[in-house]
């Protein structure tokens, strides 16, 4: 009992020393001020998107294969089976106002705002009947790992984003619990890829998905992956 009391007293003394060294660390004024600061990373789906750019639309850096795939899925969306996912509904809506004018820098994760075509260049389409999300992806030079090829971490990111978005559109908010990736063939920078994911099964709060990355023509299988997501508590 004396040993436990000594540990508690030591912790309290350390906290007191910390507050003496940094008296403004936990002041009531700062706490009140923090509550009134703009929330640049709100996950509220009601955040206005007026004036935000839709990064999932074609731009001048898209190669012909990316344009062709985009037009193919856009045509399929006319049947109602597929739906194009605006980028600001999945990424940019986390920022209030124009992200280029918020003063927090020129980058958002997955999007480069100062220049098109140099990072993650992609758009997504969702098929509700198949619980399937596809991402048309063109990796830029900012994603380079081995010379001329995409870094494995960037490949994992686009898989997580595609499969995660598919899980969200299928069953609501989720968090990634596990991502298992088999890298089969390196991905050249600037090529066009089809990232194809679907929800395999749902068990309680667990959402199991499968994903693969292939070349635009389907002749090369670059990557295979499985993912486990957990439904968020509301």
Image: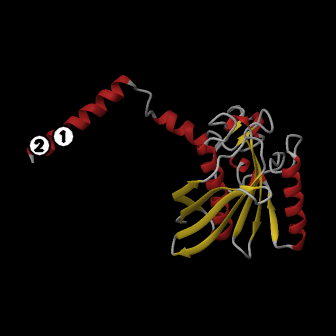
| Residue in the picture at 79% in, 51% down | 49
Give the number of callouts.
2
Locate residue 88, reporting x and y percent.
76, 51
Question: Helix, strand, or loop for circle 2?
Answer: helix
**Residue 234: image tag:** none
Q: Viewed as shown, does residue 70 lie left or right of 230? A: right
Tell me the residue that label 2 is attached to: 3
Please state which of residues 212 and 56 is positioned toward the viewer in this rendering.
Answer: 212
State the scheme by which the image is colored.
secondary structure
| Residue in the picture at 89% in, 41% down | 60
Give above or below for 135 relative to 186: below
Image quadrant where residue 35 sits: top right
Q: Is residue 148 visible?
A: yes
Q: Residue furthest left?
A: 2
Question: How packed is label 1: few (under 14 Cα within 10 Å), some, or many (20 or more)?
Answer: few
| Residue in the picture at 88% in, 52% down | 67
Q: Viewed as shown, does residue 144 lie left or right of 73? A: left
Please state which of residues 60 and 164 is positioned toward the viewer in this rendering.
Answer: 60
Locate residue 91, reporting x and y percent.
70, 50
Q: Are marks 1 and 2 in contact (CB under 8 Å)?
A: yes
Image quadrant where residue 53 sits: top right
Please state which of residues 99 and 226 is positioned toward the viewer in this rendering.
Answer: 226
Question: Helix, strand, or loop for circle 1?
Answer: helix
| Residue in the picture at 69% in, 71% down | 131
| Marks 1 and 2, how far apart at CA | 6 Å
Tell me the residue that label 1 is attached to: 7
Locate residue 33, reporting x and y percent.
56, 36
Q: Is residue 42 visible?
A: no
Specify the quadrant that holds the C terminus: bottom right
Locate residue 150, reporting x and y percent.
66, 41
């Amino acid at each position: 009992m004396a040993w436990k009391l000594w540990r508690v007293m030591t912790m309290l003394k350390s906290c007191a020393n910390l507050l003496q060294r940094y008296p403004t660390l936990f002041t009531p004024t700062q706490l009140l001020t923090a509550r009134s600061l703009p929330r640049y990373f709100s996950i509220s789906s009601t955040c206005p998107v007026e004036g935000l750019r839709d990064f999932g639309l074609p731009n001048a850096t898209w190669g012909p294969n990316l344009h062709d795939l985009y037009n193919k899925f856009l045509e399929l969306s006319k049947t109602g089976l597929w739906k194009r996912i605006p980028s600001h509904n999945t990424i940019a809506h986390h920022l209030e106002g124009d992200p280029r004018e918020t003063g927090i820098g020129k980058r958002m994760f997955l999007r480069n705002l100062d220049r098109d075509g140099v990072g993650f260049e992609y758009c997504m389409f969702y098929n509700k009947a198949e619980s399937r999300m596809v991402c048309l992806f063109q990796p830029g030079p900012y994603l380079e790992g081995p010379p001329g090829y995409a870094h494995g971490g960037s490949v994992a990111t686009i898989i997580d984003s595609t499969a995660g978005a598919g899980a969200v559109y299928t069953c609501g908010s989720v968090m990634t619990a596990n991502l298992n990736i088999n890298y089969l063939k390196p991905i050249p920078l600037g090529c066009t890829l089809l990232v194809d994911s679907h929800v395999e099964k749902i068990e309680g709060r667990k959402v199991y998905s499968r994903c693969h990355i292939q070349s635009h023509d389907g002749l090369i299988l670059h990557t295979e992956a499985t993912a486990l997501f957990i439904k968020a508590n509301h």
